[in-house]
Amino acid sequence: QVQLVESGGGSVQAGGSLRLSCAASGYTAKMGWFRQAPGKEREGVAGIYIQSGYAASVKDRFTISRDNAKKTVYLQMNSLKPEDTAMYYCAAGSGYGGILSESAYNYWGQGTQVTVSS
């Protein structure tokens, strides 16, 4: 069992930046970030395995990275938009799905809220 603890969420104005962190209690091959806005389904935002991948809506604005020694994954979010407002969840696992697919992940964090105001 791997436990995940997210941090770094908060409120920011449009155009601002935030960095999310997710500390894991153990190593997993795949790590990712998902988000869920009110009334919407959870969606994959960014994932990292051999390479990193991004949803089209965040590509060139968000960057995922990991520090295996610290068992931590980061999500640097720049040029934030009001539509980025959501609960952000860290995920970890070794499933067969792609890194933006929930099926790739076995473990989930509790989530951290990101709110972007216009």
Image: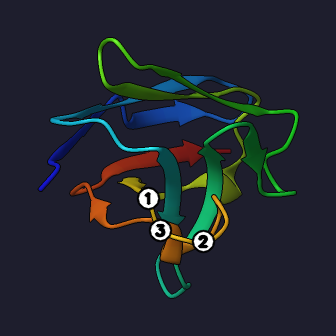
Q: Quadrant of residue 17?
A: top right
Amino acid at pointer 3 = Gly
Residue 66 to residue 111: above or below: above
Residue 11 can be seen, yes or no: yes
Amino acid at pointer 1 = Ser
Is residue 48 rendered to the left or right of residue 92?
right
Q: Assign a secondary structure to mark 1.
A: loop
Q: Are marks 3 and 1 in contact (CB under 8 Å)?
A: yes
Residue farthest toward the top in the current orientation of the protein:
69
- Residue named by callout 1: 94
Residue 37 can be seen, yes or no: no
Residue 102 or residue 37, whichever sits in front: 102
Residue 36 or residue 109, whichever sits in front: 109
Q: Position of residue 38 (x, y in %)?
A: 46, 78
Is residue 90 rendered to the left or right of residue 15?
left
Query: What mark, if any, has residue 43 been given in the picture?
Result: 2
Local packing at callout 3 (Cα closer than 10 Å; few below 14, some 14-19, many 20+) is some
Residue 3 to residue 57: above or below: above
Q: Are marks 1 and 2 in contact (CB under 8 Å)?
A: no
Of labels 3 and 2, earlier in sequence is 2
Amino acid at pointer 2 = Glu
Residue occupying image coordinates x 76% and y 47%: 53
Q: CA distance from mark 1 to mark 2?
A: 18 Å
Residue 48 or residue 115, whichever sits in front: 48
- Residue named by callout 3: 95
